[in-house]
């Protein structure tokens, strides 16, 4: 099979190789997916740059979509021919979705409805599930006001849509160039975090109360807003990432006297029941065709280095996807 891989950490053009590898076969409880698309997420490029390798050779990317073409013992043969999307394909495993085929446990290949194309399917494992789980933790519902930081980002765009679908008022942060993208997802107001005082503007938009919850992509920049009243009393700060991989100070007095909750999670490590609930909720929205999928750029497998560079540049609005055919 054709695949892309790296054998050492480094810059995309220096370490990524595209070539031929032996096509894998599924073992007991596994399926093999003939991939049509592979999602490129920020965590994939961070892993390539600096995460210690778990094996001599790494095929990157956890998200993908394609068709099951072989099953192992214990898996119904009726799954052959099924359209699927994948999650955690390269999490604690060496071979991900930047290839013609991927083999993985059967439950990590989820049915993909016919109304969702493969490129969109390659955006569900990390962006889609992260946004769905975060919206649930934030209690997005009618009568609640949610702040989504990075509302034009891959996760934020889904989170904004999901919050809106559930009846919440969603305020988003985005740069001026991406504000319309956030509004198209359902944000009723967009705060330009580069030019505006985010806490002051959010308090103005909420009559001084603050928001009921935050769905946050970067704790390193948002934590300092907590003691400025951006969260209403008994509010909840749900965070799934940070641009700084170091200790981040959070105001304990603000947390204590306002009875605030800080909830941090990483989508790779959801509990089984959490993933099941998020997947079921995401699938229902997909089947109802309620979500808009934002594909910012597509690349062929041969151009995987350029795809990684596009993610690293931060200039692409929407998901970056490799297309295998």
Image (spheres, grey):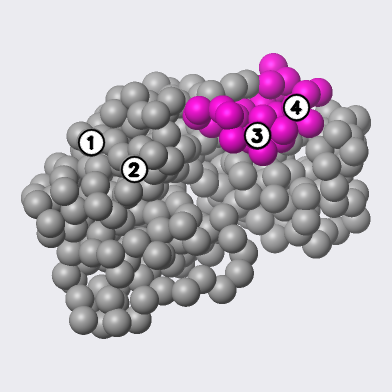
Identify the element where label 1 is drawn: strand
Q: CA distance from mark 2 to mark 4?
A: 33 Å
Q: Is residue 14 above or below residue 219?
A: above
Q: CA distance from mark 3 to mark 2?
A: 23 Å
Q: Which residue is mark 2?
A: 196
Seen in the image, is 236 located left or right of residue 246?
left
Q: Residue at x 78, y 50 (%)?
A: 49
Picture quarter with the N terminus: top right
Q: Is residue 223 above or below residue 132?
A: below
Q: Which residue is mark 1?
A: 189
Q: Is residue 106 magenta?
A: no
Q: Are marks 4 and 1 in contact (CB under 8 Å)?
A: no
Looking at the rendered image, the disc whose residue lies closer to the viewer, 3 or 4, is: 3
Closest to the observer, 322 or 222: 222
Closest to the observer, 46 or 277: 46
Q: CA distance from mark 1 to mark 2?
A: 13 Å
Q: Residue at x 52, y 44 (%)?
A: 125
Residue stretch rendered in magenta on the structure: 299-325
Seen in the image, is 267 located left or right of residue 152?
right
Seen in the image, is 126 located left or right of residue 161?
right
Q: Residue at x 41, y 58 (%)?
A: 222
- The picture places residue 62, in percent across and down from the top left corner, at 63, 46
Q: Earlier in the sequence, mark 2 or mark 4?
A: 2
Q: Residue at x 78, y 24 (%)?
A: 303
Numbered badge on residue 313: 3
- The picture places residue 247, in percent across and down from the top left corner, at 56, 73
Q: Is residue 65 above or below residue 87?
A: above
């Amino acid at each position: 099979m054709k695949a892309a891989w790296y054998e050492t950490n480094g810059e995309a053009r220096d370490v990524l190789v595209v070539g031929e590898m032996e096509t894998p076969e599924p073992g007991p409880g596994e399926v093999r997916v003939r991939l049509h698309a592979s999602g490129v997420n920020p965590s994939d490029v961070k892993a390539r740059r600096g995460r210690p390798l778990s094996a001599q050779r790494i095929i990157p990317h956890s998200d993908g979509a394609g068709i099951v073409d072989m099953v192992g013992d214990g898996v119904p043969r009726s799954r052959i021919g099924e359209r699927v999307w994948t999650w955690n394909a390269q999490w604690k495993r060496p071979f991900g979705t930047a290839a013609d085929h991927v083999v993985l446990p059967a439950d990590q290949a989820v049915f993909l409805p016919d109304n969702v194309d493969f490129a969109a399917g390659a955006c569900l494992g990390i962006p889609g599930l992260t946004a769905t789980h975060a919206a649930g933790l934030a209690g997005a519902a009618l009568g609640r006001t949610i702040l989504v930081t990075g509302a034009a980002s891959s996760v934020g765009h889904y989170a904004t849509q999901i919050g809106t679908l559930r009846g919440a008022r969603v305020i988003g942060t985005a740069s001026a160039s991406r504000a319309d993208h956030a509004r198209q997802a359902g944000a009723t107001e967009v705060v330009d975090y580069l030019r505006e005082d985010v806490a002051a503007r959010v308090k103005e938009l909420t009559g001084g109360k603050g928001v009921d919850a935050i769905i946050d992509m970067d704790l390193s920049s948002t934590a300092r807003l907590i003691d400025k009243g951006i969260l209403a009393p008994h509010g909840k700060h749900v965070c799934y990432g940070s641009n700084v991989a170091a200790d981040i100070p959070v105001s304990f007095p603000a947390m204590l006297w306002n009875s605030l909750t800080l909830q941090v999670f990483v989508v790779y490590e959801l509990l089984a029941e959490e993933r099941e609930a998020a997947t079921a909720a995401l699938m229902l929205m997909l089947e109802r065709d309620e979500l808009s999928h934002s594909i910012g750029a597509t690349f062929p497998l041969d151009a995987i280095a350029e795809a990684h560079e596009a993610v690293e540049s931060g200039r692409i609005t929407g998901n970056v996807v490799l297309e295998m055919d």
